[in-house]
Image (cartoon, rainbow, N blue to C red):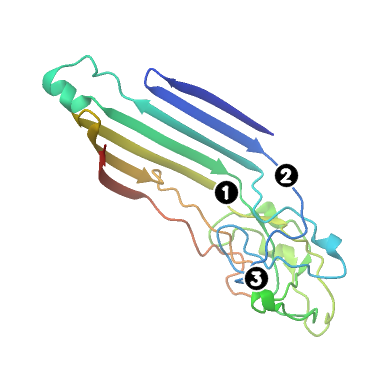
Amino acid sequence: MQWTVNRRFTEGFYFTTSYTISKALDYVSSMNETGSGPNGASGETDLAQNPFNLRRSTALPSLMRAIAGWTSASWELLFSRSGTGAAKAVFAGWQLNGIANFSSGTPFTVYDSVDFSQSGSAPEVQGFPANRPNLVANPNNGPRTVERWFDITAFQRLDPVGNAGQYGNAGRNIVRGPGFHGLDLSLLKTFPIREGHSLQFRAECFNFPNHPNFFIPENDVASPNFGRILQAGPSRLLQFALKYLF
């Protein structure tokens, strides 16, 4: 489902907003050529654990965000158009713009880098196997912290000796990663020079609330950092510029 609301540019103001709810299924999303590991989107070895049972790999796509929305707005400050002299020079010509967006987290797969199934590694993903542990509880019950994003006790590792040649029952992409929230703002002022020529001052701020957008947590049960978030997106960034328009 998708809906969009627009307001055409009238009296110095315009906005458009969109909201999407979606779901999809696949059995492979992409070939992760760098292997498994925590990153911004998927962080999985996108391979069938058992190549003779592809149905067990049917799951949510690695890049799917079930909920996503964004809003873009622009406001041309008109309160000083009727002014004159110094007041008009200082206050006229300003424009405020903003882009806000949010989305739910992408799903990812918990895997085991120990090849207990003895299926061998896949050269196309630089030698990473596609083994998964057993699932004994719901990993999405929390605690949703940087030190432990999901319930790591929900997964049970298979013994490389006692369970050699077996496959874990955990599904592909069953854990939900962190969502995304962003707000970018810009403030512009245009100084007319002559007909067809102007100078524009720009003050821009990316990630204005300085909200941390986390990457997915470490998803290898063999790692000492299993379940921890080790990376995040960029923090607040400010930049200023002068732009000559002609």
> Which quadrant of the rendered structure holds the C terminus?
top left
**Which of the numbered marks, if any, corresponds to residue 179?**
1
Q: Earlier in the sequence, mark 2 or mark 1?
A: 2
Label 2 Cα neighbours within 10 Å, binned few <14 / some 14-19 / many ≥20: few
Residue tagged 2? 23
Tell me how far mark 2 sits from mark 1, CA to CA.
16 Å
Q: Nearer the viewer, residue 170 or 162?
A: 170
> Which quadrant of the rendered structure holds the N terminus?
top right
Q: Residue 162 falls in which quadrant of the image?
A: bottom right
In the rendered structure, are the residues bearing label 2 and label 1 in contact, judged by CB atoms less than 8 Å apart? no
Q: Earlier in the sequence, mark 3 or mark 1?
A: 1
Mark 2 against mark 3, which lies toward the viewer?
Answer: 2
Q: Residue at x 57, y 70 (%)?
A: 225
In the orientation shown, which residue stands out farthest toward the right? 52
Q: Residue at x 77, y 82 (%)?
A: 160
- Report the amino acid beneath label 2: Lys
Could you tell me which secondary element the residue under label 1 belongs to? loop
Q: Residue 88 falls in which quadrant of the image?
A: top left
Tell me how far mark 3 sits from mark 1, CA to CA.
20 Å
Q: Position of residue 23 (x, y in %)?
A: 72, 44
Could you tell me which secondary element the residue under label 2 belongs to? loop
Residue 103 visible, this orientation: yes
Residue tagged 3? 220
Q: Position of residue 59 (x, y in %)?
A: 77, 55
Image: 67 above or below 135:
above
Q: Position of residue 137 (x, y in %)?
A: 76, 59
